[in-house]
Amino acid sequence: MDVMELLRGRRTYRRFLQKAVPEEVIQDIIEAARLSSAGSNRQATSLVIVHQPADVEKVNALVKWAAFLPPEQGTPKPGEQPTLYVAVVQDTRVSGDLNTDTGIALANMTLAAWAKGVGSCIMGAINRPKLTALLGLPEHEKLHTMVAFGYPAHKSYIVPLQTDNKYYLDAEGNYCVPKRSKEQIARYL
């Protein structure tokens, strides 16, 4: 798949088929994070893989979905929930701009998964204290985000931005994601 095609298709997905993400895809996600660029090669991002169904269910209770939609539309119902979570963690003993490094790792991870047909949702609206305890993170590790992974049960596509950047559902329940045009985001000097 061409990289631009991959980028156009890698949207956020919030409803999933109940099909486990295979170990080979999990290994690609880990490898993609490992290979990601980091300022001064500091490599302060690490991952906690949550793939056992009972543990995934515990995480489901500690994350929030689709802030622009009413919960009955944006929150996956039973039978639509992700089958894998990856906790993205920062080592606070390392100095520097960890958020940029973590963002690069997140992009790599979600693209690697999407290349195998596995969708994702990067989640910042999470219960960090309870998830930190559940994941058994030591004091020097800070939970940055949770990423939900699974095979999408809906479509997500880009539509032109009119006046509002809020995503919405179309008549079939697919996600419409308004994006600015190239002319709106870039100018030449």
Image (cartoon, rainbow, N blue to C red):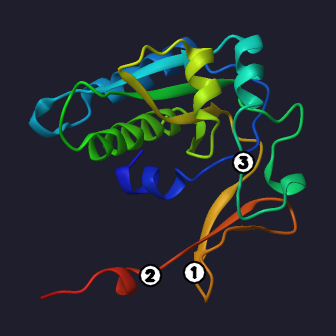
| Quarter occupied by the C terminus | bottom left
Q: Quick check: can you spot residue 42?
A: yes
Q: Which residue is mark 1?
A: 160
Disc 3 residue type? Trp
Left or right side of 125 for 100? left
Q: Relative to residue 51, is residue 73 depicted above or below?
A: below
CB of mark 2 within 8 Å of CB of mark 1? yes
Secondary structure of residue under mark 1? strand
Crowd around label 1: few <14 · some 14–19 · many ≥20 (10 Å): few
| Residue 65 image label | 3
CB of mark 3 within 8 Å of CB of mark 1? no
Residues under labels 2 and 1: Cα distance?
Answer: 7 Å
Secondary structure of residue under mark 2? loop
Percent from the top left, x then y, of residue 89? 42, 27
Q: Relative to residue 34, is residue 185 depicted above or below?
A: below
Q: Which of the two marks, 3 or 2, is nearer to us in this view?
A: 3
